[in-house]
Image (spheres, rainbow, N blue to C red):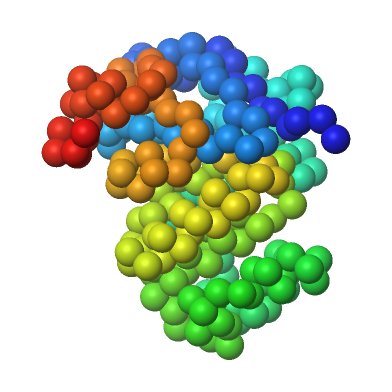
Amino acid sequence: MKDLFLEVDSIQKSFNGNNILKNISFQVKKGEIVSIIGRNGSGKSTLFDVIFGSISSENKFVRINGEVKKNTFEVKDGLAFVTQFNHFPQNIKVKTLIDLFIDEERIKIKFLEDDLIMNILKHRVKNTSYGQQRYLQVKIYLYSTSSFCILDEPFAGLSPLMIDNISRQIIEQSNHKGIIISDHQYEYVLNISTKNYVLKEGNLIKIEDRNDLKKLGYLNNYPK
């Protein structure tokens, strides 16, 4: 099977005359974890919404394996998108939710090899904490059949143990799909990413190492 790749090309988006995204282009392949770092309000979530097709833009080309896709959410096994918000039904049991999203038994067995999941398996979603819901949502989408996955603030509300576990699973699942990630806890992102960008003033800037981030005002307290 040939390598899977998602191309984002020439995305432009403005609000009230302000250019939020200026000709944004990048690519992610199966096996890559591409990070997009930026301050609050820099346009990261807007970029992800445009790529996914949940909001419009003045210009964009998104290709999956060379084919232009207007709305990637309509593509079967195309792109999964974990937004900043937990959106699973609150009254459903965690086990039922997992059964709905993961039907291949081999994958489900692997998914359940996790004490953090087993501890809440019989609970209703509403009876779990925000961090547990976040962990569950991120993991379910990582284990989905999608070829690509966007993770917007996946570490928000997670304990250090949860972050370690989900980071390991992001790396593991990148063997099967391309992953785009953004989180304000930059050090955790940089520990797992294979390619890095900063979104600043509407421009996407390629980052080669941590010193580049420091020059842009990030990681000032991070050790060399």
Position in image of residue 35 (x %, y %): 45, 34
Identify the residue at horizontal 64%, vertical 80% (top origin). Answer: 95
Q: Is residue 104 above or below residue 147?
A: below
Identify the residue at horizontal 57%, vertical 40% (top origin). Answer: 179
Which residue is most to the bottom?
A: 122
Identify the residue at horizontal 72%, vertical 70% (top origin). Answer: 108
In the figure, is residue 6 to the left or right of 220?
A: right
Q: Is residue 15 visible?
A: no
Position in image of residue 40 (x %, y %): 28, 37
Res 177 quadrant in image: top right
Res 214 quadrant in image: top left
Report the front residue among 145 and 81.
145
The N terminus: image quadrant:
top right
Report the front residue among 10 and 163.
163
In the figure, is residue 111 to the left or right of 184?
A: right
Position in image of residue 152 (x %, y %): 45, 45
Q: Is residue 9 above or below residue 197?
A: above
Identify the residue at horizontal 69%, vertical 28% (top origin). Answer: 5
